[in-house]
Image (cartoon, rainbow, N blue to C red):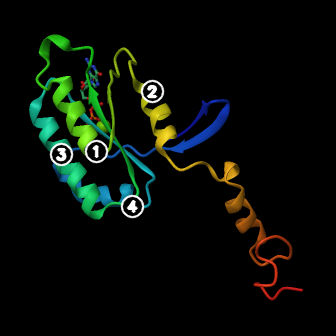
Amino acid sequence: MSKLILVDGQPIKYQIWDTAGQEKYHSLAPMYYRGAAAAVIVYDITRATTFTTLKNWVRELQQLGPENIVIAVCGSKADMEEKREVSRGEAEAYANEIGAIFLETSAKTNKGVQDVFMELCRKLPKPVSENFDNVADLRDTGKKGGKGEGKSGCC
Ligand SMILES: Nc1nc2c(ncn2[C@@H]2O[C@H](COP(=O)(O)OP(=O)(O)OP(=O)(O)O)[C@@H](O)[C@H]2O)c(=O)[nH]1
Ligand SMILES: [Mg+2]
């Protein structure tokens, strides 16, 4: 899905793919994370095994994913405090260790969901429109004027 969100008045467009977490679909995952700017890895705070699985996904991304991918570690089902198996402290410490964003979220109450995308925006490279050198480079390719002048052999 594609989603537009405003961060400090600036529109940021996300293209979001939801991969199936089940092991039988594992081999499809590289199709999704190849070329991705960010990955949101979700575990279930009420099931410790899902946190172990999350660590495996992080390892895979670190080894096979894009070099500068920004990772968000998300503890879902934060509305089910009474069934918690993964402490906030443990998950937060792990996220810090790998330089990831950390948030506990709930799809049921919507807690933290928007924040994940806001935090990602802060960590991702600035959009091209804010990066004037890049804009100039793109415009100048094969055309006269600006930085690319003289290199293209055009006119
Ligand atoms: N209470 C509560 N239930 C949730 C929350 N998120 C998901 N669920 C429930 O957990 C179950 C699994 O949710 P899914 O969204 O299918 O989980 P998933 O991670 O997409 O699973 P896969 O696609 O198989 O990897 C469903 O019954 C949801 O209703 C949440 O934040 N709170
Ligand atoms: Mg799913």
Which residue carries the number 1 mark? 20
Any mark on residue 115, and which?
2
Q: Secondary structure at mark 1?
A: loop
Pointer 2 local density, CA inside 10 Å: few below 14, some 14–19, many at least 20? some
Q: Percent x, y for residue 96?
A: 27, 39
Q: Separation of disc 3 and disc 2 at Cα?
A: 22 Å
Tell me, yes or no, whether the two marked residues, 4 and 2, touch with CB atoms within 8 Å: no
- Label 3 SS: helix
* Location of residue 72 by image quarter: top left
Q: Quadrant of residue 42?
A: top left
Q: Is residue 25 visible?
A: no
- Name which residue lies at 71% across and 66% down: 138
- Across and down, in percent, residue 119 comes to 46, 34
Decide which of tag 3 and tag 2 comes sooner along the chain. 3
Q: Residues within 10 Å of mark 3 (few under 14, many from 20)?
A: some
User: Foreground mark, 2 or 1?
Assistant: 2
Q: Which mark is residue 55?
A: 3
Q: Which mark is residue 34?
A: 4
The answer for how far apart the CA atoms under marks 4 and 2 are is 24 Å
Is the CB atom of the residue marked by disc 2 within 8 angstroms of ligand 1's nearest atom?
no
